[in-house]
Image (cartoon, rainbow, N blue to C red):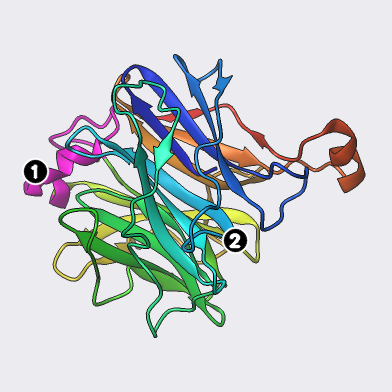
Amino acid sequence: MVGPMYYKGFYHLFYQYNPNAVFWDYNIVWAHAVSRNPIDWTLLELAIVPSKQFDIKACWSGSATVLPSGVPVLMYTGIDNRSHQVQNVAYPADLSDPVLHNWSKPHYNPIIFPDNNVNGSAFRDPNIAWQWRVVVGSKADMKGFTVLYRTRDFKRWIKANHLLHSGMTGMWECPDFYPVAVTRGRRHYQYGVDNVDLSDRALAEEVRYLLMVSLDLKRYEYYTIGRYSYSTDQYIPDTEFPDNDFGLRYDYGNIYASKTFYDPAKRRRVLWGWANESDTHRYDYLKGWAGIQVISTFHK
């Protein structure tokens, strides 16, 4: 799973796809489907394929959103010509096209690249959080962590002085970081919190935040709920949430690399999941696919 999005009456689903085989390998692209509802989907042309030095070896996971200006944007990890993992963006070629058939990669990619303190072979899966913030998964030996970056124009990004959060659990893949309403808060808890609402600083301080990470070693997703400090750019889980790989899981089935987005049409946060199934490689080959997108879960 990479990026769900809602634009001009259509739900968009971007997902990782290998056009040459039913198994995962480095030749990954972004496929694209659209729907008027989250159930019936129409497959479109591939959205992103390797074509530039900054993604010539693969186009890996990422996320999608609509900017405050109304312009959709995709952010993804590209494997560049040096086999480094770098973060890139793509924009629609035609904003009047509601199903967004074609996408363009600006010349200033990559927008985020690994510095001397980040492992260039483990720096991936950018998640567009809110208020011009992005979190990226990484690791250093057995320490998994998320790095937060801020921007004012979605071109030039500044790395936070501190890690957003970390744990001794191996690589953190596909992080998801978003606000959740609290009981008796100003935003009624029966509805999800739209990221754009966080421009209200008082509301941003009141809500809690959910951090989910997919643990590469465990192949499961774990989450905590806590507070985010705007002054230090650090996330602190509430004490009742175990902060390790024995904590709460998103799902107790074979689900991995999930992604949420706020659905402005229905005023809800939607969780999309990737089920890796449990079939053998031989059966995957015979049926012609491996892995499915599971039915959405709707969070209030």
Q: Position of residue 186 (x, y in %)?
A: 12, 35
Residue matched to label 1: 200
Which quadrant would the C terminus be assigned to in this image? top left
- Residue 189 shown in magenta: yes
Tag 1, which secondary structure?
loop
Label located before the other in sequence (1 or 2): 2
* Neighbours of disc 1 within 10 Å: few (<14), some (14-19), many (20+): few
Report the side of 95 relative to 291 (left or right): left
Query: In this orientation, does residue 126 appear?
Result: yes
Vertical arrangement, residue 14 with respect to residue 126, above or below: above
Tag 2, which secondary structure?
loop
Residue at left 54%, top 54%? 60
Report the side of 230 relative to 275 (left or right): left
| Disc on res. 57 | 2
Mark 2 residue type? Lys
Mark 1 residue type? Asp
Q: Position of residue 204 (x, y in %)?
A: 15, 48
Query: In this orientation, does residue 211 appear?
Result: no
- For the residues labelled 1 and 2, the Cα–Cα distance comes to 41 Å
Q: Position of residue 236 (x, y in %)?
A: 30, 65
Residue at left 17%, top 33%? 187
* Neighbours of disc 2 within 10 Å: few (<14), some (14-19), many (20+): many
Report the side of 76 relative to 283 (left or right): left
